[in-house]
Image: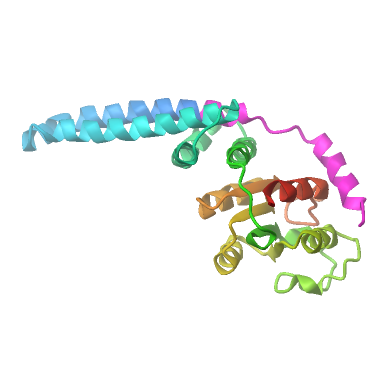
């Protein structure tokens, strides 16, 4: 098996700082505080109007808002405990993931206020998400694992169409696709090269995997992981030495390790 993209991927990964989970957690904590203050403001503003309709309505609204905030806070606490290494039940981790999904858009906006690049927040989100999935220690049969990779990982000069059929790849070594296909053959897993989120969701719906290993940029990984929830998905960032969506690459050794972690 060619070692070209193993070495190249490791060199690129060494040049890119590992995303910090604490960035996303800090933004989520601020988001939770903002959400709490917003709920209180909504309750105060609507109190008099609701009270004119019924004396019970303000308390009903307040109870709903408090229950929602407590549930999200429990989810946030679940994320913290999971990252610290404490055992957590699947139900608790599920609540944690739901809390992340709810607060993620607000975390992005708060990041902008503090002049934090969206890509940094997304990388941190992916790191947190991967950690939560690994905490579940999910194991699947090879036929139930799907590797999704974007078409930009194929060399732009290649004339062979692999988004419809990966068997069209000639494994010439100009891009990582050949190495990824060899991994798929070696471990007996499914692999698909997709042109975007719509096709990725279609492949997931057709193959119905029990776990997904996705390779993409920050934006596509973030949206993809959220779209297929509750299906467990581990995201691996691609590298873009020639810019976005052109001759991207990936650390194949990292992909292989992620595959092994999923398989029975």
Q: How many labels does the image show?
A: 0
- Looking at the image, residue 264 sits to the left or right of residue 109; the answer is right
Name the image quarter holding residue 66.
top left
Task: Write down the region rendered in magenta.
Answer: 1-27
Q: Is the magenta stretch mostly helix, strand or loop?
A: helix
Q: Is residue 52 above or below residue 170?
A: above
Q: Quadrant of the N terminus?
A: bottom right
Residue 146 position, x and y percent, is 66, 59
Q: In this view, does 188 lie above or below 220?
A: below
Please say whether residue 223 is one of the residues in the magenta stretch.
no
Who is closer to the viewer here, 199 or 49? 199
Q: Is residue 113 visible?
A: no
The image's colour scheme reads rainbow
Q: Which residue lies furthest to the front in this view?
A: 264
- Looking at the image, residue 150 sits to the left or right of residue 26; the answer is right
Q: Residue at x 50, y 38 (%)?
A: 93
Q: Can residue 81 be seen in this view?
A: yes
Residue 75 position, x and y percent, is 45, 33
Name the image quarter holding residue 206.
bottom right
Who is closer to the viewer here, 159 or 242? 159
Who is closer to the viewer here, 204 or 248? 204
Q: Which residue is drawn at 84% across and 69% down?
A: 158
- Looking at the image, residue 44 sits to the left or right of residue 257; the answer is left
Residue 35 position, x and y percent, is 38, 31
Residue 195 position, x and y percent, is 66, 64
Q: Is residue 140 above or below residue 198?
A: above
- Looking at the image, residue 96 sits to the left or right of residue 203; the answer is left
């Amino acid at each position: 098996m060619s070692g070209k993209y193993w070495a190249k991927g490791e060199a690129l990964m060494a040049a890119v700082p590992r995303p910090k989970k604490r960035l996303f957690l800090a933004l989520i904590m601020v988001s939770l505080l903002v959400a709490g203050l917003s709920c209180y403001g909504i309750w105060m503003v609507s109190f008099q109007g609701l009270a004119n309709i019924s004396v019970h309505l303000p308390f009903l609204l307040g109870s709903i808002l408090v229950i929602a905030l407590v549930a999200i806070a429990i989810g946030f606490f679940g994320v913290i405990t999971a990252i610290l290494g404490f055992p957590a039940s699947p139900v608790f981790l599920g609540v944690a993931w739901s809390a992340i999904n709810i607060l993620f858009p607000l975390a992005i906006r708060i990041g902008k206020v503090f002049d934090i690049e969206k890509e940094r927040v997304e990388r941190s989100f992916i790191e947190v998400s991967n950690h939560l999935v690994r905490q579940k220690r999910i194991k699947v049969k090879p036929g139930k694992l799907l590797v999704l990779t974007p078409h930009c990982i194929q060399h732009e000069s290649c004339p062979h169409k692999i988004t419809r059929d990966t068997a069209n790849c000639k494994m010439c070594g100009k891009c990582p696709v050949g190495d990824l296909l060899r991994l798929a053959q070696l471990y007996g897993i499914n692999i698909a090269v997709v042109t975007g989120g719509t096709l990725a969701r279609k492949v997931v719906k057709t193959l119905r995997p029990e776990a997904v290993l996705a390779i993409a940029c920050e934006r596509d990984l973030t949206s993809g992981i959220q779209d297929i929830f509750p299906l467990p998905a581990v995201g691996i960032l691609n590298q873009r030495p020639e810019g976005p969506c052109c001759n991207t690459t990936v650390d194949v050794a990292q992909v292989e390790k992620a595959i092994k972690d999923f398989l029975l």
